[in-house]
Amino acid sequence: MNWMCEKLEVSRSGFYAWARRHDSAHRRRDQVLARRIETHFEDSAGTYGSPRVHALLRREGERVGRKRVARLMREAHLRARASRLYRRIPAPTLERLGIANQARQCQVTGPNQVWRGDVTYIKVPGAWRYLAVVLDQYSRRLLGFKLGARHNSELTVAALRMALAKRRPPPGLIFHSDRGSEYGGYLYRDRLSGRGIVQSMNRPKTMTDNAFVESFFHSMKSDVIHGHVQRKPAELDAVVRRYIAHYNRTRIHSALAYRSPIDYERTNA
């Protein structure tokens, strides 16, 4: 002990006083918060970053700053997963379609005013699968989806059909998508016009016009696709179905005042 105190250049009495000293109130508070933060992080399967964890703590009545939550997560090495998206490049003929971005200037104040659709790629052993979705811009709620082995209009029409069966929106609904052939073909355009739905598309060479759906794809791939063992097609279908149910009912969104899509619709009904 004498040797250690000499090396540290402290007195024996000073060392024993330090050893008997209790943790400060701030440190004890950090320890309690760290355990609650870890619980929320684990409940989200490692997908929630500090903003969402902070929102959950505040909802529980915890008075804590976002910077403190971020610091405690860094110290505990809790980092939300992230993923990248595969972007498609429309054919030149589709870029010249005379369909404007009708959704860009629309002020969305409730459900069934603007729906958005898109398709993403998911890798499975030896092949790709394609997921088409339809979501309501107001609440980000997934209304329809279809997972298939072929990337075509039949896939996107199937997702639209599911959404229409659930909501039955009045004429005048705006449906927005990119300029992919599965949305620009006659099959899809006829289905929209037959229901009185106004078609809207991304501006040419503007990939951010459909960010609402891209955000969903990013969340899904971060949460249950990337970083997980590749699944067989039949297993992937079950994973997607479970995730969409979780996304609609449970997963909180910063743009929705940290509520889930279903909760947001109920709260603002």
Image (cartoon, rainbow, N blue to C red):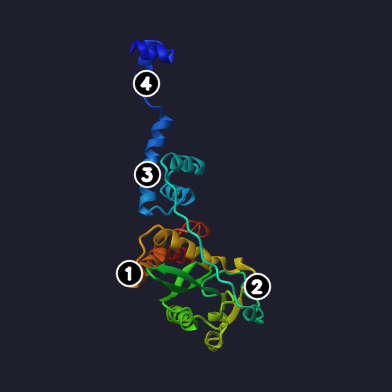
Q: Could you say which is closer to the camera, residue 175 or residue 138?
A: 175
Disc 2 or 4, which lies upstream in sequence? 4
Whole-angstrom CA distance, mark 3 to mark 1, is: 33 Å
Badge 3, how many Cα within 10 Å: few under 14, some, many 20+?
some
Which quadrant would the N terminus be assigned to in this image?
top left
Whole-angstrom CA distance, mark 2 to mark 3, is: 45 Å
- Residue 85 vs residue 12: left or right? right
* Front of the two marks 2 and 4: 2
Q: Amino acid at mark 1?
A: Glu
For numbered disc 1, what is the local secondary structure? helix
- Residue 188 vs residue 40: left or right? right
Whole-angstrom CA distance, mark 4 to mark 1, is: 55 Å
Q: To which residue does mark 4 refer?
A: 21
Q: To which residue does mark 1 refer?
A: 235
Whole-angstrom CA distance, mark 2 to mark 4, is: 65 Å
For numbered disc 4, what is the local secondary structure? loop
Q: Amino acid at mark 4?
A: Arg
Q: How many marks?
A: 4
For numbered disc 3, what is the local secondary structure? helix
Q: Amino acid at mark 2?
A: Arg
Q: Kindly indicate whether the residue at mark 4 contacts the one at mark 2 (C-beta within 8 angstroms).
A: no
On the image, which quarter does residue 98 sit in?
bottom right
Whole-angstrom CA distance, mark 3 to mark 4, is: 25 Å
Q: To which residue does mark 2 refer?
A: 203
* Front of the two marks 2 and 3: 2
Q: To which residue does mark 3 refer?
A: 36
